[in-house]
Each structure stands twice: as C-alpha cells, then as structure tokens.
Amino acid sequence: MKKYAPYFALFASILYLPSGQLQAEENRVQFPDLDELVHYTTVRRGDVMEHIMTTPEAMEAVEERRSIPYGTHFVLVDHRDGELYRYFVMEKGEGFGDDYDTSRRTDDWQFQWFWPDRSINTDENTARCQSCHRRQASSDYLFTGYRIPRFDGSPVE
C-alpha cells in the first residue's frame, strides 16, 4: 500500500483543484514592431497610464466600419508610477478562435501579456482577458475602438 501513496496524493490533489480554473498560457500572439503602430489614445487611472496603439489599417477599418483585418495588433503599453510595467497585446489571426471552445472565444482574437523585455508574462491569465473582452463583441472586442475616429493624427500624451 505504501508504494501507492504518492499516486493517491497526486489523485487527491487533482480532485481538489478548483474547477474551471485556467492558468496562464502561451498562444499564437507575437510581439509586434511598435514602430509600425499608431498611438491613438491614452487612458489614465491613478498612477497607471496606458498608451494604446494599433496599425493604420486597423484604424482605417474601424473608421469605415469594416472588420479589422487579420494580422492586426492592438498594444496597451502599461506604465505604473512613470515606469514601463508590461505590455498587453491583442492579435487577430485567421483561425485563432479555433484554439478555444465557444465559451471562451473572442472571434479570432488572442491575448497575451509581455514583460518590459518583451518576453511572455505567464503570470497573467489570458482567459480573464477573453472573459472581459467578450462583452465588447459588438465593437470587434475592443474597449477603445470608439476613440479611433476621434484621433486627429496629433501626438497623444
């Protein structure tokens, strides 16, 4: 019986894991070339400042009320107390939605957090991102897309 004790412990720990808990994960999101993106808005919340960027093609699609093209990145550059803290990247890719069951799918968008050195931040739970962005289905899963038509091309602070 003693030789089976480790297996019983493993089985018991699996049984008592919180159901539905999703861990951080790697996915198909690639870190984009930030020099190719347009900084179209900034969101401030206390000591947090978020610069939000995307491609000129995505901005044009939003303004013309077309679907955002595959290959598009939206990047939230997260600063805390004046220092770069992390990046949040959304990428739309053909078939990206097929990687998830329908309860988690956000069309063909995937989400990923990156550290300032641009390595993947697996401390963050991307399922939480999908859960929140699912509420924005009517705006192609974007929270700040409505700000794009207001952008006049001037530098955003």
Image: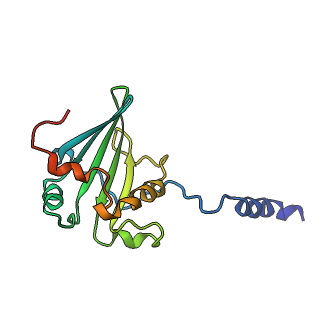
The total number of labels drawn is 0
Q: In the rendered view, tell whether residue 81 sits above or below residue 95.
A: above
Q: Nearer the viewer, residue 108 or 149?
A: 149
**Residue 55 in the image, given as x and y percentages of width and height:** 17, 53
- Asked if residue 32 lies left or right of residue 104, the reply is left
Q: Nearer the viewer, residue 97 or 61?
A: 61
- Asked if residue 56 lies left or right of residue 106, the reply is left
Quarter of the picture holding the N terminus = bottom right
Residue at the far right in the pictured view? 1
Q: Nearer the viewer, residue 98 or 147?
A: 147
- State the residue at coordinates (70%, 62%): 14
**Residue 84 in the image, given as x and y percentages of width and height:** 33, 33
The picture quadrant where one finds residue 98 is: bottom left
- State the residue at coordinates (33%, 58%): 29
Q: In the rendered view, tell whether residue 110 sits above or below residue 155.
A: below
- Asked if residue 150 lies left or right of residue 27, the reply is left
**Residue 130 in the image, given as x and y percentages of width and height:** 42, 59
- State the residue at coordinates (29%, 51%): 31
The picture quadrant where one finds residue 4 is: bottom right
- Asked if residue 128 lies left or right of residue 43, the reply is right
Q: Nearer the viewer, residue 128 or 83?
A: 128
Residue at the far top in the pictured view? 81
